[in-house]
Every structure is written in C-alpha cells, then in structure tokens.
C-alpha cells in the first residue's frame, strides 16, 4: 500500500492511500502528485479543513463515499452540485456545503502525526490558510 507524507502548515503526517476501497480516486490523485494547495477551515461541515478546487476535474465519480469522515480521513468531493474539493477531518464532521449535505470519496487515511491533527485544525481556524503538500514517502 503506497505511503504518503502530508505536510500541512508546520506539521508532517504519514498517510496511506485507500487503494482497495477507492482505486479510481487514488489513481487520479496519484497522477496529480506531488499535490500542493492551501487548506482553509470548513464553513458548514464542523471540525475539518478543506481545499477548494473550483472546477478541477479528477475524472472520477463516487466510490467509498461518506458524509461523515473520521478524524484523519481525507475525502475527495468530485464536483457536481458544489465545487470540487478535498476535505481533511480533524474532529466531528458532517460534510456539507451551502447546497446541503455532500459525500466525498474516502481515499487517504492519516496514520502518523495524528497528535498534531487537532492543533492543525485550530491553527487553520484562528490563523487562516495553511500550505499543504502531498508526496510519496
């Protein structure tokens, strides 16, 4: 199972791609690697940070999708009724937008550095956008 390093703000996390549960989403994301963006705090979803990606098309539909990612789970919303986005849960999340409840593909699970996850979320909430980078370990 491919291992990732996710650097977000001043923190580094280890992660794994959910290749069996979301193979198309993982393959599409791997084609974008290294993936660099900014995270901002979610508006409607609870304790999470997200990367608004506008009309970026990963070319995938729904697979392994959820509206309730657990802390450390990363989901990709492939677009449709709202813009494409990637969300990282750091606490309780009910994934939604101004259009209502959404579901995203759970394709990455953070496995290391989790002791800094909540701090990253609160830092993003109170200090604003943070850089994020996904790369292979």
Image (spheres, helix red, strand yellow):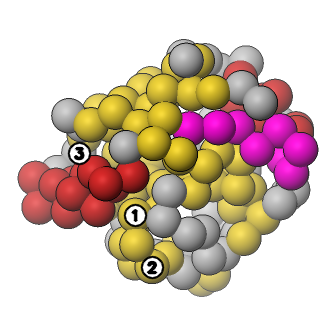
Q: Is residue 112 visible?
A: yes
In terms of secondary structure, where does tag 3 sit? loop
18 vs 83, nearest the viewer: 18
Alpha carbon distance from label 3 to label 1: 15 Å
Within the image, what quadrant is residue 81 found in?
A: bottom right
Quick one: 18 or 96, which is closer to the camera?
18
Q: Which residue is mark 2?
A: 92
Q: Is residue 84 visible?
A: no
Specify the segment rendered in magenta. Answer: 15-22
Q: Which residue was labeled with disc 1?
A: 90
Q: Magenta includes 43? A: no
| Residue name at image x 89 percent, y 44 percent | 20
Question: Helix, strand or loop at disc 2?
Answer: strand
Which disc is residue 129 wearing? 3
The residue closer to the viewer here, 55 or 39, is 39
Residue density around tag 1, few if under 14, some if 14–19, many if 20 or more, within 10 Å: many
Quarter of the image with the N terminus is top right
Whole-percent x, y for residue 69 in the image: 60, 69
């Amino acid at each position: 199972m491919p291992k990732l390093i996710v650097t977000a703000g001043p923190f580094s996390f280890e992660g794994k791609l959910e290749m069996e549960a979301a193979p198309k989403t993982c393959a599409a994301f791997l084609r974008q690697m290294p993936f660099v963006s900014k995270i901002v705090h979610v508006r409607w979803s609870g304790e999470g940070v997200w990367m608004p990606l506008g009309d970026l098309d990963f070319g995938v539909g729904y697979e392994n999708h959820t509206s309730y990612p657990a802390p450390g789970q990363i989901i990709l919303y492939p677009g449709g009724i709202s813009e494409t986005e990637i969300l990282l849960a750091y606490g309780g999340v009910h994934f939604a937008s101004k259009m209502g409840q959404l579901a995203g593909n759970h394709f990455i699970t953070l496995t290391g550095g989790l002791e800094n996850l909540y701090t990253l979320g609160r830092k993003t909430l109170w200090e604003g956008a943070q850089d994020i980078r996904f790369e292979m370990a």
